[in-house]
Image (cartoon, grey):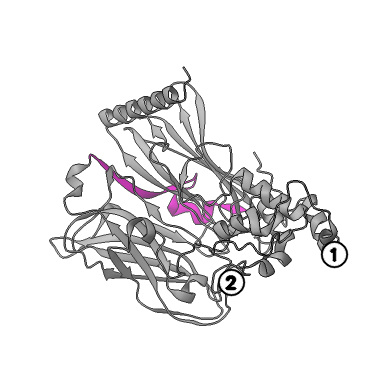
Amino acid sequence: MKIERKYLQLAGLATAFAFAAGIAQAQAPHENEITYNGDAGRIINENCVVCHREGGIGPMAFESFEQVRPWAPLIQLKVANLEMPPYAYDHGIGIQDLQGDWRLSRDDIDTLVAWVDQGALLGDPDVELPPPDVRDLDEWNFTERLGPPDLIVPSIPIDIPANGNDIWHKHMVPSGLTENRCIRAVQVKPRGDAATVVHHANSRMMTIGNDGELESMSESMLTEYAMGKWGELMPEDVCRVLPANALVSWDIHMYPGGIGATAPGTIIEDNVVELGLWLHPEGFEKSVAFKQDLKSYEIGIPRAEREYNLVIPPHGEIMTQGFHSFDHPIRIDSFQPHGHLRLVAASLEIYHPDTGALEPISQVSNWSATWHHSHIFEPDSAPLVPAGAVLVFKQWYDNTADNPNNPDPDQWVSGGNRTTDEMTHAWVAITHLDEDGYQRLLTEREQAAARSLAGSGQE
């Protein structure tokens, strides 16, 4: 199967040429006129200014009509192609109820497209839009919902050169926690300019055993940060434990000079990556029945052999598949595909051997290494998977010139850790259930669906 991707639309190009010729400004008013000082500016302020502002990670600012209007054709093109806001998750396939979902609604997309088609007009100059409600650039993502982090664990400072090969830095720092606590949310945030050079940062929990030796827990993963990632939220009915006196083991991958539109191409001194942790109160673990973990699920190629078995020929395309099942019921809480510059699409499905059905869960048809997302399912919509069902992971790779992220389609590409190598796995947060817990969650959903149906007046 090949995921077809469309990078340009004729309508967008036509609008761009019209603007270049000054034609768009001469268009006559429309009966349903859309203006910047009306719906168009509201949509941009609510969805775009968070990145496109002075000091933000967007390559241009969209804080006023004067700043926005020269970019109107490009805005239309990116919005119509579902490339902006940068949240690659397909509409209409699988589960659509997500936390931290940046996608525009269909109505908002149509409004912005129509605004540009009508000439990207200002509207009534006496009307002032409410100022964008955006957080401080250095603020943690979950502060508005949960307050500031209960615990911040920084890496050691690392100097990053302006150019050269990929750099990995592995070290451990004390968490500072003196009692067992359940984790409520996690975010990794490179400090300042470090965001432009950090490719990814894995953080794990380590403990010291009675013999003084380091020990890694089976559920040791805290989070995998990659460029653009929002963070991890845990459902209220689970505990992911951070043990007392734990050490945080950092594995930070940095790319000299940076990657993406905002890469500075200069030395970044004292690069620090911070781990923010929101914790449940002491004793919370006793009030919940389920445990959750976050793990990497390989897609077709064992980790020890990935470097040799994943090979993409020059100007070639491949697909990888992986299959995982459990001897107990589970709930899938989040799904995050991972790859590098040649990965273009990914999907998650569930195969039910009792019926032969293949259930679509998530599909990402325009994946980009410059924006990584943990697709966090709303708790009431997160897939409940019976024992024996099979998680089916698929990822598609494009090493041709049609892939705009491909630095060199003439190269053979193999599996490995460098940015120019490839990987094929997915990070998945899973709540492990027993049969009673699984049946209880199923019953609760069936009852909620019945109440919703009754409230709508349908039978």
Disc with the residue nearer the chain's start (2 vs 1): 1
Question: Mark 2 highlights which residue?
Answer: 262
- The span shown in magenta is 289-312
Q: What is the x, y in percent for residue 281?
A: 20, 54
In the rendered view, does 261 fall on the left or right side of 25? left
In the rendered view, does 431 fall on the left or right side of 317? left
Q: What is the x, y in percent for residue 388?
A: 38, 29
Q: Is residue 256 magenta?
A: no
In the rendered view, does 178 fall on the left or right side of 405? left
Q: What is the x, y in percent for residue 74?
A: 71, 60
What residue is drawn where x is 21% and y is 55%?
A: 181
Q: Amino acid at mark 2?
A: Thr
What residue is drawn where x is 57% and y is 50%?
A: 88
Q: Is residue 320 above or below residue 402?
A: above
Quick one: SS at disc 1?
Answer: loop
State the residue in front, 130 or 145. Answer: 130
Quadrant holding the N terminus: top right
Q: Is residue 150 above or below residue 30?
A: below
Location of residue 175 by image quarter: bottom left
Contact (Cβ within 8 Å) of mark 2 with mark 1: no
Would residue 404 be visible to someone looking at this image? Answer: no
Location of residue 222 by image quarter: bottom left
Question: Within 10 Å of the Cα at label 1, are there few (<14), some (14-19), or many (20+) other Cα atoms?
Answer: few
Q: What is the x, y in percent for residue 58?
A: 59, 67
CA separation in Å, label 2 and label 1: 30 Å
Q: Amino acid at mark 1?
A: Gly
Question: Mark 1 highlights which residue?
Answer: 22
